[in-house]
Image (spheres, rainbow, N blue to C red):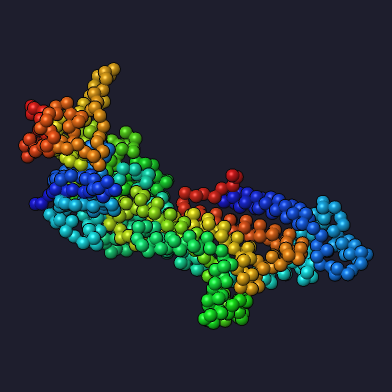
């Protein structure tokens, strides 16, 4: 178990390092951020002074070395646009994204897994076919379009929900979140549904596939031969067997949604990190891009670690060990 | 006293695009408590479907279309689905072919067995685990308490099959359907399990229907034998009688194909041809195209030309000796 963790941490360090090189070189290739930020009327002298101030006149290797030294000193840089440390910037935005993603994952799991179980239990019923058709829509219709339809319907025509933004926050047990106020919920529910549709479709299909396969296995037949009712067979026998692929995909989806809920955040004007990274790319805010992507890598590594631990809990045949 | 299991005129059909296929055709037999019936046939003869039909576990597109399954005198087919479910595990139980697949890989042996206890008897979890331990001891598993804590992958194949048999025995059912339960095991383990099953039938009075393709196994284990071909029982009688004195040409062929009975170096006799597809059976006797004794009259379904004790569905049975 200990060797497993050491191996994983070593792997994570290599991945983060490789990622930082790729991102740094990529960002370097895009162009000079000073040209975007500077007043077009500024003189060449001011321009060159600024370039030198940010160290952009140095060769790539030197710039990267400076960056690495700063990172090990705990300094991920300062945003060129907001002029505040990147870490502070990201963490000021992160709770909003976390709220949105948490609610959307809950919706996706809460609706998708029961619907998938049912569709797999009675694969020939009309309802199951309807569920499957909806799941195809869920991940083939573009997110931004559904988002706009939701706004048109519930915000503009019906006027039930606000069209965007994050609601009032309240503090509970030392945690500040908009999920503690009714206003917060009225703001979060529409973008969360929008963000959940793709994941919901995925959950439905994965769960159904697992369920259909499990229904034909001997251990299910054996359980039925013991007189177990179907409900108990599904929840005590099957669900745990089919949960491994579900947990895998959920982990991947959780990571990518946390990092890149860009489209939904833009459509609903949600002040999260997805919107931050898009704005940074548009403004060539180099420190934010590099540091953010590195933080995303760390996030993925952490989520995968948790997923592995969950595997070992779910399936007794999985043993965590070092190497590989 | 009524028989543990009596099957009368059981017929199971599967609807396919080409129409209904009859997998089990007018099958009747009777098993007394503590007796073992060997249900013998090749793959596709309908022997496993017969087993599942008795359990009431035929899935769509299959359906039992006629007949009765009497367990201790009550007809299971007359029951509601819920009543049938309550019979399963308590009055009739089943053991499958591949012990690697019949236990749930992610649940402890004890949890699975306790679930099977508690579905019919409202007892505490601790009491259910205790019942499971007793059942494991009955089938000869040493260190039963530790085995209950184990996951299936930590046990050997023979051990898993014993666990499956113990699970089937939990409620002391009147009947156990055993669907080729030793086919996937090593020969040495197979022998142990067979001896164990024989002992259990004698001691507990459970009637066992032993479904198999292996005549050698049933000849040493079973009290009675029923030979199935293309969905029908073509010959039935006591094991000693059927093995020593087979009267159906198909049974004769099966016995002749058992390797152990021949001198080494000689060609093994075979039954020509292969089992017919159920979707297009020949008219009359289904064995007709492969039968050395077939004549024109075999185009009609043969009646029982044997006795009640030793039935043979054949127009030209071999001579009784």
Q: Is residue B300 above or below residue A263?
A: above
Horizontally, residue B108 falls left or right of residue B72, namely right
Front position in the image: B27 or B236: B27
Which residue is depicted at the point 11% across and 37% down? B300
Residue A261 locus on image (x, y percent)? 61, 65
Horizontally, residue A290 falls left or right of residue A182, namely right
Which residue is depicted at the point 35% across and 60% down? A125
Residue A191 locus on image (x, y percent)? 57, 71
Tell me the quarter of the image containing the C terminus of chain A: top right
Residue B142: which quarter of the image?
top left
Horizontally, residue B36 falls left or right of residue A1, namely left
Front position in the image: A23 or B99: A23
| Residue that lies at the very extreme toward the top in this rendered image | B265
Horizontally, residue A106 falls left or right of residue B230, namely right
Residue A77 locus on image (x, y percent)? 78, 64
Q: Is residue B177 above or below residue B242?
A: below
Which residue is depicted at the point 61% across and 73% down? A268
């Amino acid at each position: 178990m200990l060797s497993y963790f050491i191996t994983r941490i070593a792997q994570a360090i290599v991945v983060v390092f490789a990622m930082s090189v790729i991102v740094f070189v990529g960002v370097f290739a895009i162009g000079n951020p000073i040209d975007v930020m500077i007043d077009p009327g500024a003189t060449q002298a001011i321009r060159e002074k600024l370039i030198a101030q940010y160290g952009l006149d140095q060769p790539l290797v030197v710039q990267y070395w400076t960056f690495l030294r700063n990172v090990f000193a705990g300094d991920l840089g300062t945003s060129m646009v907001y002029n505040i440390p990147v870490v502070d910037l990201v963490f000021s935005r992160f709770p909003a994204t976390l709220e949105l993603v948490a609610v959307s994952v809950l919706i996706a799991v809460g609706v998708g897994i029961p619907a998938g179980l049912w569709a797999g239990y009675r694969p020939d019923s009309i309802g199951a076919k309807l569920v499957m058709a909806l799941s195809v829509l869920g991940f083939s219709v573009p997110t931004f379009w559904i988002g706009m339809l939701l706004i048109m319907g519930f915000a503009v025509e019906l006027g039930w929900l606000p069209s965007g933004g994050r609601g009032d926050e309240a503090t509970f047990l030392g945690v500040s979140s908009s999920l503690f106020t009714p206003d917060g919920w009225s703001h979060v529910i529409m973008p969360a549904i929008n963000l959940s549709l793709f994941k919901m479709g995925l959950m439905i299909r994965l769960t159904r596939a697992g369920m259909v396969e499990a229904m034909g296995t001997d251990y299910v037949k054996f359980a039925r031969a013991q007189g177990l009712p179907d409900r108990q067979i599904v929840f005590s026998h099957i669900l745990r067997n089919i949960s491994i692929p579900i947990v895998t995909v959920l982990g991947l989806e959780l990571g990518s949604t946390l990092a890149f809920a860009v489209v939904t955040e833009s459509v609903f004007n949600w002040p999260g990190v997805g919107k931050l990274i898009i704005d940074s790319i548009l403004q060539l805010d180099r420190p934010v891009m590099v540091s953010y992507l590195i933080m995303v890598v760390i996030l993925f590594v952490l989520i995968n670690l948790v997923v592995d631990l969950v595997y070992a809990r779910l399936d007794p045949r999985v043993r965590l060990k070092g190497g590989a | 006293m009524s028989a543990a299991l009596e099957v009368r005129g059981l017929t199971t059909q599967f609807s396919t695009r080409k129409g209904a296929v009859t997998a089990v055709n007018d099958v009747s037999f009777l098993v007394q408590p503590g007796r073992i019936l060997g249900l013998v046939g090749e793959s596709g003869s309908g022997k496993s479907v017969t087993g599942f039909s008795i359990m009431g576990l035929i899935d769509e597109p299959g359906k039992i279309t006629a007949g009765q399954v009497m367990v201790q005198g009550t007809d299971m087919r007359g029951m509601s689905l819920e009543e049938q479910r309550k019979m399963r595990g308590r009055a009739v139980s089943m053991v499958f072919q591949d012990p690697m697949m019949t236990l749930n890989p992610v649940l402890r042996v004890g949890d699975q067995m306790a679930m099977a206890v508690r579905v019919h008897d409202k007892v505490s979890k601790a009491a259910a685990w205790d019942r499971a331990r007793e059942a494991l001891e009955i089938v000869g598993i040493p260190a039963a308490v530790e085995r209950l804590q184990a996951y299936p992958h930590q046990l050997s194949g023979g051990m898993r099959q014993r666990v499956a048999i113990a699970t089937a025995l939990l409620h002391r059912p009147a009947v156990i359907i055993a669907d080729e339960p030793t086919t996937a095991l090593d020969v040495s383990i197979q022998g142990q399990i067979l001896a164990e099953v024989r002992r259990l039938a004698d001691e507990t009075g459970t009637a066992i229907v032993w479904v198999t393709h292996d005549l050698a196994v049933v000849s040493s284990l079973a009290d009675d034998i029923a030979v199935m071909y293309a969905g029908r029982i073509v010959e039935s009688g006591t094991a000693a009688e059927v093995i020593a004195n087979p009267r159906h040409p198909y049974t004769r062929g099966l016995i002749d194909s058992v390797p152990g009975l021949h001198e080494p170096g000689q060609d093994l006799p075979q039954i020509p041809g292969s089992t017919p597809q159920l979707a297009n059976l020949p008219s009359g006797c289904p064995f007709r195209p492969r039968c050395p004794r077939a004549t024109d009259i075999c185009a009609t379904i043969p009646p029982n030309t044997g006795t009640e004790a030793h039935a043979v569905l054949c127009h030209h049975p071999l001579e009784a000796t």
